[in-house]
Amino acid sequence: MKRKILENFNWSLLWVTLSLMVIGLVNLHSALSFWGEGGGYQKLFWQQVVWFLAGFGILLVLVTMDYRLWDKLGKYFYVMTLILLVLVLLVGRDISGNRSWLGVGSFGVQPSEFAKLGIILVLAKYFSSNPMPGGYGFKDLLKPMALAGVPFILVLMEKDLGSSLFFPLIFMSMALVAKIQKKTLIGFLVLVTLGGGLAYQFGLKPYQKERIRIFMNPESDPRKSGYHLVQSKIAVGSGRIFGKGYMKGTINKLRYLPDKHTDFIFPVLAEEWGFVGAMLVLTLYGFLLWNGLGIAMKARESFGIFLATGVTALLFWHLVINLCGVLGMIPLTGVPLPFLSYGGSSSIVFLMGIGLLLNIHMRRFMF
């Protein structure tokens, strides 16, 4: 049986993940280096290397476990992340106006990233244990909505709007796969529309409303509120077809592009490698998502189907929200780009998700 498990290992998914990690490190090295300043901020580069190694070690551990164990362990992981989110509100660190970090000394962890994986585990358990062939009605979805709502509210209280969005998005992605009754789906759309309008009027902070205004017309204030988005577009466009060359991006090296090792890592890539390099990376992402969907479709039992769906949705929404934000297609929310943006907690969670996908694929023949 062990030999058959190894024979069914998804090497293509592993290689595309490793390829994105290598590209991420190469691109991060450039993003953290500045002309005339020696090594720049290369300490962050080596920290990312350590996070990748730690995450890959956890990936290997997850691959060796039978993923069905998370059918029982998922609720404990979920509760643990809720406890950490509460601790963030009590003793967390404030970084860039968000209280979303727990840390001792220079070591920090962002519980909201792990909470995304926690909600995937408990929703996979709920939907697999409560099948509704005729589709889920509103009452049937109250419990999973509550499960997603608790971390959503806690993260929102941390003033981390970008991370909070993932809980309703993951919930809706998994619920759509589980099948929602048409009238319930229409009702959800109406509620989201009304809720979005009310949130804009009464829930958003002034700086968050300013992001939406600048999204509509970033050139109206190019030196202040629109500066990030204007410089991002300039960096992407100036790369043209083949780019300016590695370590030669002027918008990057002259520090015109802010937060370029985190939220705006893609414009660094596009400026130096151009349209060709950007499309290569997007192709790798597309292959990653296609692989995730394929694993979900080929899984032989419902928990594996929903678990693979949730992980793929997590990667998909990170990709869409980050890229659309830096390209000016949606308001900026500040979420990491998988395997390219600097970040320890997010990198580990992404690699844990890949480990679960590999596990589901390996064991699909057992059912």
Image (cartoon, rainbow, N blue to C red):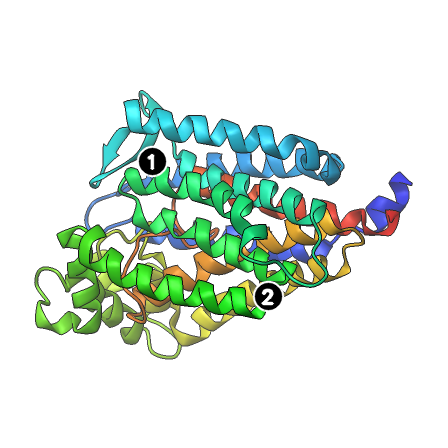
For badge 1, the amino acid type reads: Lys
Judging depth in this view, the residue of 65 and 261 nearest the camera is 65
Q: Is residue 135 above or below residue 55?
A: below
Which residue is farthest top? 104
**Residue 161 percent location from the top left of the image:** 30, 49
**Residue 356 percent location from the top left of the image:** 66, 44
Q: Which mark is residue 198?
A: none
Q: CA distance from mark 2 to mark 1?
A: 52 Å
**Residue 198 percent location from the top left of the image:** 25, 59
Count all numbered tags in the image, as a single digit. 2
Q: Is residue 63 above or below residue 362?
A: above
Q: In the image, is 321 to the left or to the right of 2? A: left
Name which residue lies at 62% across and 34% down.
Answer: 74
Q: Dot 2, crowdedness within 10 Å: few (<14), some or many (≥20)?
A: some
Marks 2, 1: nearer the viewer: 2
Q: Dot 1, crowdedness within 10 Å: few (<14), some or many (≥20)?
A: few
Q: Is residue 287 above or below residue 158?
A: below
Residue 290 sits in quarter: bottom right
Q: In the image, is 94 to the left or to the right of 61? A: left
Name which residue lies at 74% across and 34% down.
Answer: 65
* Residue at disc 1, secondary structure: helix
For badge 2, the amino acid type reads: Gln
Q: In the image, is 32 to the left or to the right of 150? A: left
Q: Is residue 138 above or below residue 342?
A: below
Name which residue lies at 9% across and 60% down.
Answer: 224
Q: In the image, is 80 to the left or to the right of 321? A: right
Residue position for label 2: 181
Residue position for label 1: 43
* Residue at disc 2, secondary structure: loop
The reply to whether residue 236 is visible in this rendering is yes
